[in-house]
Amino acid sequence: MERVERAERAERAERILEAAAELLLAWGYRRVTIDEIARRAKVGKGTVYLHWKTKDALFLAVLVKEQIHSQQRQLTQMRHDPLEVLPSRRAGSLFREFLHRPVLRALYTDDSDLLGRLNDIAKKEFAQLIAETDRMLGRHLQVLREHGLVRDDADVHHQRYSLMATVSGFFSTEALLADRAPDTPEVRADILTWTVRSALETPDPDSVRAVAAAAAAPEVIALYEHLAELSAQEMHRQLRS
């Protein structure tokens, strides 16, 4: 009986999260009410509050859920193909996700029209998770340097900044220069992949890089697994205990 109740609670929470995400994209954070979320999820208003104490906590959970899904997709790709640990491949994959997942896109571009004050709340609430993500990215690059996959003629912290700035620039450009973007989204993802590879990675052929990537992959994957675990903990923290 207890197992059934837990399953029902989890299914109900998932419905509420999906309803909240749909309304967030349709109306923006400021206009969405708990009443509308409950109506969309086909539950009572009180049921929403059984899961989340506040509207802020619920929408923070929507953002964390998007991050968790992104992390799990990244892990699946890296486990399937060790070359996916390369920053150029990760950047290209993240850009494709960015284009096709509107909540993730709003989060990465600080879309205040959509997220409203949730932007500032998320930065405060997720400060530890953001700091850990930055640390993980630095360690990711360091591991690749140790395996000869990333250039070692620059400070790794400068490389991390360069990578973050390049990816963020491509994200912002999708909104700022949408009418002048070349070709298809897939081509633009390839351009980002090429840009990061040219700036950060060693020029070895893929056959050589594949061997080194296979050696580096277990440690890189472990970093992302740790980050996914921290994100899951953050999701749980937003729930009512």
Image (cartoon, helix red, strand yellow):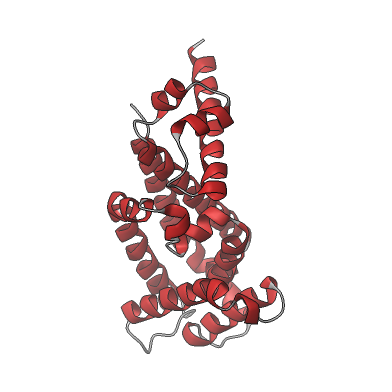
> Residue 162 at x, y = what percent?
40, 80
Please determine whether, in this image, residue 121 is positioned above or below residue 149: above
Residue ID at (54%, 68%): 90
> Residue 92 at x, y = what percent?
58, 71
Residue ID at (49%, 59%): 106
Please determine whether, in this image, residue 206 is positioned above or below residue 16: below
Rendered image quadrant of residue 94: bottom right
Residue ID at (55%, 71%): 175
In this view, the residue in front, 114 or 60, is 114
Quadrant containing the C terminus is top left
In this view, the residue in front, 119 or 135, is 119
Q: In the picture provided, is 52 more to the left or to the right than 41?
A: left
Rendered image quadrant of residue 161: bottom left
In this view, the residue in front, 58 or 87, is 58
Farthest residue, direction top: 1
> Residue 100 at x, y = what percent?
63, 59
Farthest residue, direction right: 183
Rendered image quadrant of residue 75: bottom right
Please determine whether, in this image, residue 204 is positioned above or below residue 212: below
> Residue 38 at x, y = what percent?
51, 28
Farthest residue, direction front: 31
Q: In the picture provided, is 194 more to the left or to the right than 46?
A: right
